[in-house]
Image: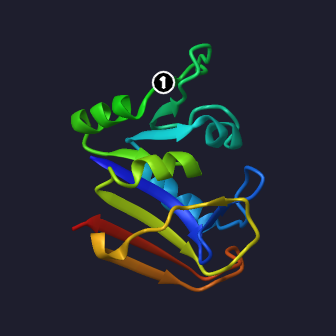
Amino acid sequence: MISIIVACAENRVIGNKNTLPWHLPADFKYFKETTLGKTIVMGLNTFKSIGAKPLPGRKNVVLNNDPNYVPPEGCFLAKSIEEVVEMGKKEPEVMICGGASVYKQFLPLAQRLYLTYVKASPEGDTYFPEVNTEEWKETKREDHKADDKNKYDYSFVILERK
């Protein structure tokens, strides 16, 4: 199964200058808990934004069609969407982790969305694609208020394709 995991602001912003425009430790924890033991797939820019090294406890796949690109030790390379779709047929859940162009390509193929809605409208240069709510059913929601560590209200929402 192909799933998408993303933190997205009210204005659909997901990034600014290849970084997250907010700091939400609760979302980092949620991301880790949700992706541990699974295959995660990201584009090269997203991979660079996390330090260009694999996240522990997951199979890390960099999606890149550059024939000269060699992923670092501990990472795998997928050269096409089709390769990732094949992984999704063989594994219980493949998690798409960004960035924007990767999300756009996989949104029509995803069966599940793990969305962290950040109650803010920060400036950004990278956006999550528009989600057609008619195609999705909300199956879980956890609403959280801002606190000492998390500056904004946020919600963890899981959507399943109808």
Helix, strand or loop at label 1? It is strand
**Circle 1 residues within 10 Å: few <14, some 14–19, many ≥20:** some
Q: Does the image show residue 95?
A: yes
Per the image, the residue denoted by label 1 is: 76
Residue 74 place in picture, x, y as percent: 53, 23
Judge whether 103 appears above or below 65 on screen.
Answer: below
Image point (69%, 37%), residue name = 48
Image point (48%, 24%), residue name = 76
Judge whether 159 appears above or below 110 on screen.
Answer: below
Residue 97 place in picture, x, y as percent: 51, 48
| Quarter that holds the C terminus | bottom left
Q: Amino acid at mark 1?
A: Phe
Q: Does the image show residue 136?
A: no
Residue 128 place in picture, x, y as percent: 55, 61
Image point (61%, 18%), residue name = 69
Judge whether 150 appears above or below 33 on screen.
Answer: below
In this view, the residue in front, 30 or 97, is 97
